[in-house]
Amino acid sequence: MLPLARFKDRIIATREIAARPARYAPFPVGLHPSLQKALELRGIAELYCHQAEAFEAAQAGENVVLTTGTASGKSLAYLLPVIQAVLDDPTARALLIFPTKALSQDQLRGVLDLIDQLSGRRIEAGVYDGDTPPAERTRIRDRCHLVLTNPDMLNAALLPNHGRQGYSHIFRNLRYVVIDELHAWRGAGGSHTANLMRRLWRICRHYGSKPQVLASSATIANAREHAETICHLPFRLIAEDGSPSGGKVIYFWQPPLMGNDQRKMVTSEMALLVPYLLEKRYRTIAFCRSRKETEIVLKESRDRMRDVAGHDEAYLLAGYRGGYTPEERRKVEKQLTDGRLLGVISTNALELGIDIGALEIVVQGGFPGTRASFWQQIGRAGRRGDVSYAIVILAVSPSDQYIAQNPDWLTGQAAEHAVVDRDNLAIQLAHVRAAAAELPLTLDDAAVFPDLGEILPVLKKAGELREVHGAWHWAGGPFPAGEFSLRNIDPDRFKVVNRITGKTITEMDRPQVYREGHTRAVYLHDGVQYQVETLDLVAHVATVVPVEQNFYTQPDVRSAIDVLLTQENKELLATATDTPRSSAYFGDIAVDDAVVGYKMLEFHNHQNLGYESLHEPLRLHLETEALWIAVPEPVLAVLGKQKQDALAGMVQAVLACARLRTMAEQSDMRGSSFHYVDEQTGKTVTALVFYDSHPGGLGYAAKAFDFRDAVLEDARNLVAHCRCKNGCPA
C-alpha cells in the first residue's frame, strides 16, 4: 500500500480491483506461418483469448469493435489480420487511423517491431500526417502497405487527392480500415468523423473496394452502436478481456475544510501530493481537467520541488497538454519512457494509449467527466502487470461530492453511452461540399447524406455547384475540405507571440483567446507566466511578455439567452401519480457571451486579489440546441430573496447529472438560467437551460431531453444527499 499515513484525514474511502490472470487461446488455424514465427520470436506462444477471437472474426469477413482494458494488446489484435492480408496479397493496403499525431508515431514503433521480425516478404509502413516530409509522403503513397494517419489528414489530403498517382492505388486495394480509440470520437468530433467515413466509403465504391473495419475503444455502454453510427456498417463486439492485470488500489481523497463549508481547491491538493510522491520516487502521472489547471499545478509543484533535501528537483516534473509544440510533447514522451522524468502533469491528452513507460500512480484532479475516461486514465499506471494505484482528488463540484458519498457509483457501474449526431446539418453541409469536390454528386448520394435534398439547392444558389447530365459538379473554391476543422476548433486562429523573442508560443481559437488572451490576462505555458500586453482582433495576434508575479487571472463571462424555436415539450411529474408541476422543452436558442472583466487569483492559496473590467467587452454569438425546464411560480415565491443563488445551484446540480447521462465534457454542454416570454400564454417564464456549445448542436441536449426524468431524479438525489445546511459551494 502507498505510504499515505500523513494524509489519512483526507482518504475517505479505498476500493481494490482484484488482480486477474491471463486467459489464453492457441494460435488460430490459418495464422500465417511467418506471423506465427514472428510472435514466437517476441516470446508470445499463445494469444490472449480476445486477440484470437478478433483475428477469427476478421478472417470471417466481419467488422470488429474491441473494448478491452488499457495495455490489453488491442494493437496486436488488429495488426494480425491486417498483416495477414498483406502476406496473402502484396497489393493489399490498410489505413490505420489514430486520433492524434503522437499516437500514430507511437504505434508506428510497434508496427515496425513486428514486421521487422517477419521472414520472407518485405512489408512497409509509414506515418502520413502534416509533419511527414514530401519524399516520405511519396514513398508511403507508392510503396507502403500500412498507412498510419489521422482523421484530419484523411479529410484534408487523402480523400481530396484520391485521383492522384499513389492515392488511387491505396483506395483501389484497401482491405482494412483500422480506427483506434474510437470512443474519443463523440460530440462534434464524432459527428465529423461519421461524415468523413461517408466520404471514405463513397471513394472506395468508386474504386471498387469494400474494406473491413477493425476498431478499438475504451469501455463504453454502447460500443457496438457507437461503431455502427460512426462507420455506417454492422459490427461484432468483442468485450471479454483475456489480458492479465496486477490489480489496482483506488484512494478517494477529500480536500479538507477551511471554514464556511469551503474545501481546499483541487489544484492546491495536487501541488501538495505530487511533489510528495516524486520525493518518494514513485513514477506518477497527474491528470487535470483543463489547460489552465495543468499549468497552475505544474508551477506550484515545481515551486515546492526547488528545495528537496537541499536539491532542486523541479527538473523531474514536466507538463503535457494541447498548445505545446510537437517538439515539446515528443521530448516529454521520450523522457518519460527513458526514466529521466519521474512525473508529468497532463490534460486528457495523455489519456490515449501512448507508451510512456512503467508508471506506478495516477492522480486525478477531480472526476474526469465520464466513467470511461476514469478507467482509461487510471489504466495508464500498472501497464506492465504490477499492482498500481490511483488517487482521485475530489473537486468542489456536484458530481465529485456525490462520488465522495457513493464511491461505488464510480467503480461499480457500467460506463456511459457515447453521443454522436451524425446528421447535424451544419457538419453534413461541410462534408457534402468536400464530397462534391472529390466526385460529382448524384441522386445515389441521397442514401449517403440524408439531407442532400435540402443542401443541393443552397449550394447551387451560392454558385458552388453546376448541374451536368443529372450530376452536380463542384464549382466553388479550390479546397472546401480545408475550410473546417474536425475537432470543433474555431478556424479563426490567433497567434500568441512573445514580444521579447518574437517567437510564437502557441495558437488559440477565438473563444479561447477571448477568455485567456484578453488584455492583461496571465497566460501560463510550461510553468512560465506571460502577461498579455495587447490583443489585436484585426491582425489576430495576442502580444505577451514574460512576468513573475503572484497571481493568475480568471475571466468574468456574462450570458444572454433567447429562445428561437420550440421543437418539443413534455410535462414533468413530481411522482408517477402526481399532477404535472412543470414542463421540459427542447429547441433552438441563441446565446450571447461577453467577457467583461477578470479576477486576479493568488498562486498557492487562490485568494481573490481584485477585479478589473475590460475596456471593451469581447462578445461571442452562438445558435444551438437546448433543453430548458420551466421553474414553477410557487417555487420562485418560496425562494424569495435567495432566488438567484438557488437557481445557480439548480443549474449546477442538473448540469452535472445531464453531463454524466450524456457523456458530455465540460466544454460540450453548458448551463444557465434565463427569462423568456411564453408564446402561448404571454407570461414571463423563468427556466433552467442546458445547451450544446457548438453551432447547430451536437446531440447532447437532445439526449438530455430524452433522459429528462432520469436527469432530474439524479439531481434530486444529489441535492438530498448533500450534507451542507445553508447553501453548498459544490
Image: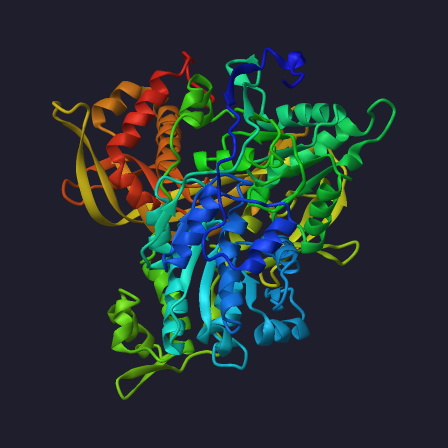
Left or right of residue 403: residue 313: right
- Quarter of the image for residue 146 reads bottom right
Note whether residue 151 is visible: no
Residue 260: x and y in percent read: 52, 13
Please identify the residue farthest to the right as the structure is shown: 310
Q: Nearer the viewer, residue 652 or 256?
A: 256
- Vertical placement of residue 599 versus 595, above or below: above
Write the residue at 45% across / 21% down: 407
Left or right of residue 483: residue 322: right
Residue 698: x and y in percent read: 36, 50
Residue 716: x and y in percent read: 31, 23
Write the residue at 48% across / 38% down: 242
- Quarter of the image for residue 639 reads top left
Note whether residue 399 is visible: yes
- Vertical placement of residue 617 versus 346, above or below: below
- Vertical placement of residue 137 versus 544, above or below: below
Residue 168: x and y in percent read: 48, 78
Check the picture and name the quadrant holding the N terminus.
Answer: top right
Write the residue at 26% across / 74% down: 444
Tally of numbered tags: 0
Please identify the residue farthest to the bottom as the structure is shown: 469
- Quarter of the image for residue 469 reads bottom left
The way the protein has been coloured in the rendering is rainbow
